[in-house]
Image (cartoon, grey):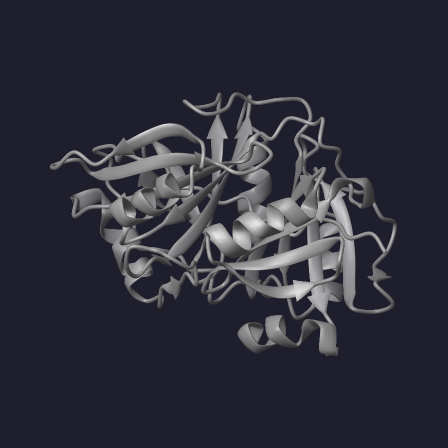
């Protein structure tokens, strides 16, 4: 069985601009498009079990699906990350990992203390100076994917996000030996593009969403209660755009058929799979395609099966 990659391209940057922000548009309640009930991302590993140990034990995330070669981890209320054995997935470990998983938390210093005690590699050390709009640090997972832990502080340009975050119950980590409660309030993936001239209209029209506000001059899009997407133009301190990308962006929905009908004829979208197909003997109904820059996009509807029971409990 081969599984594509559920991923949501979300992301939050670490500082706000002085630009005004609008009220959050959470998954377009009156959208004519089919629903998105959660976001997820597939990351690809040469040793998926080692990656699983890191996310399960070091970060303390719940495993909601275990297909053996692929494990789905719950990040936040409606945000997931899927770890895939690359030899059985759609990307190789040699492709650039040009994506950043941003984890919004209330316990930034505590997360840093915990991960440092576990000897987790840091790309950027803790920046916890008082008076800043946001504080952060960037950890590195076992095979090089960046995890940016962020705490947003009171600031006029955070108002739209604070409202969205406040509506979500943080998901607590089960990490053993943590120096107190650890939790994640929201998850965001940053995707990187050389030019947003065609990319931004493609995503905004296909998903019928609007920018919730500006963070570091970049618009953030809310797709689910805890899931955000950012389209980064030209790169940031962590990444520059690359031709290939070792991630698949995916969207969990109750109606994959309607999404297929919509996306398959959408300008700029190219199907990778000519039709919806069943994975794992019918555990998931899936189709996959490419955005105008070639990033993989996937839509998934999970079947009512024992293997999916823990995940479906949260998706209801």
- The percent position of residue 149, horizontal first and vertical second, equals 37, 43
Q: Quadrant of residue 252?
A: bottom right
Q: Quadrant of the C terminus?
A: bottom right
Residue 144: image location, x then y, percent: 56, 31
Q: Residue at x 88, y 49 (%)?
A: 274
Viewport quadrant of the N terminus: bottom right
Above or below for 234 versus 148: above
When asked about the image quadrant of residue 17, the answer is: top left
Q: Image point 28% across, 34% down: which residue?
A: 126
Q: Using residue 231 as the reference point, say whether residue 279 is left or right of it.
A: right
Tell me: 85 left or right of 179. Answer: right
Residue 113 higher or lower than 174, as above or below: above
Q: Which one is nearer the viewer's eye here, 79 or 129?
A: 129
> Which sits in the foreground, 179 or 231?
179
Q: Give the x, y percent position of residue 63.
A: 59, 63
Residue 41 showing in the rendered view: no
Instruction: Name the residue nearer the viewer: 112 or 41.
Output: 112
Q: Is residue 58 visible?
A: yes
Determine whether, in the image, residue 295 is placed left or right of residue 189.
right
Q: Position of residue 189 (x, y in %)?
A: 50, 43
* Residue lying at the far left of the rendered structure: 131
Left or right for 133, reference 308: left
């Amino acid at each position: 069985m081969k599984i594509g990659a559920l991923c949501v391209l979300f992301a939050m940057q670490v500082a706000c601009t002085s630009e005004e922000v609008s009220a959050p548009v959470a998954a377009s309640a009156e959208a004519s498009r089919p629903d998105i009930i959660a976001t997820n991302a597939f990351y690809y590993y040469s040793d998926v079990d080692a990656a699983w140990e890191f996310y399960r034990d070091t970060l303390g995330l719940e495993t909601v699906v275990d297909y053996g070669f692929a494990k789905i981890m719950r990040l936040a209320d409606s945000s997931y990350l899927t770890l895939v054995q690359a030899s059985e997935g759609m990307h190789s470990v040699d492709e650039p990992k040009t994506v950043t998983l941003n984890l919004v938390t209330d316990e930034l210093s505590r997360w840093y203390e915990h991960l440092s005690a576990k000897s987790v590699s840091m790309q950027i050390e803790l920046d916890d100076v008082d008076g800043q709009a946001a504080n952060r640090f960037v950890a590195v997972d076992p095979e090089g994917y960046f995890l940016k832990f962020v705490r947003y502080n009171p600031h006029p340009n955070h108002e739209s996000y604070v409202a969205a975050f406040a509506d979500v119950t943080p998901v607590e980590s089960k990490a053993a030996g943590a120096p107190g409660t650890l939790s994640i309030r929201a998850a965001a993936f940053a995707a990187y593009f050389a030019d947003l001239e065609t990319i931004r209209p493609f995503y905004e029209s296909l998903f019928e969403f609007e920018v919730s506000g500006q963070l570091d001059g970049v618009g953030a899009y809310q797709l689910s209660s805890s899931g955000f997407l950012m389209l980064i133009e030209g790169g940031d301190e962590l990444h520059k755009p690359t031709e290939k990308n070792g991630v698949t962006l995916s969207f969990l929905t109750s109606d994959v058929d309607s999404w297929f009908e919509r996306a398959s004829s959408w300008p700029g979208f190219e199907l990778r799979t000519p039709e919806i197909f069943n994975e794992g003997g019918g555990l998931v109904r899936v189709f996959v395609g490419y955005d105008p820059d070639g990033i993989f996009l996937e839509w998934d509807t999970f079947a009512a099966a024992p293997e999916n029971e823990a995940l479906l409990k949260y998706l209801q």
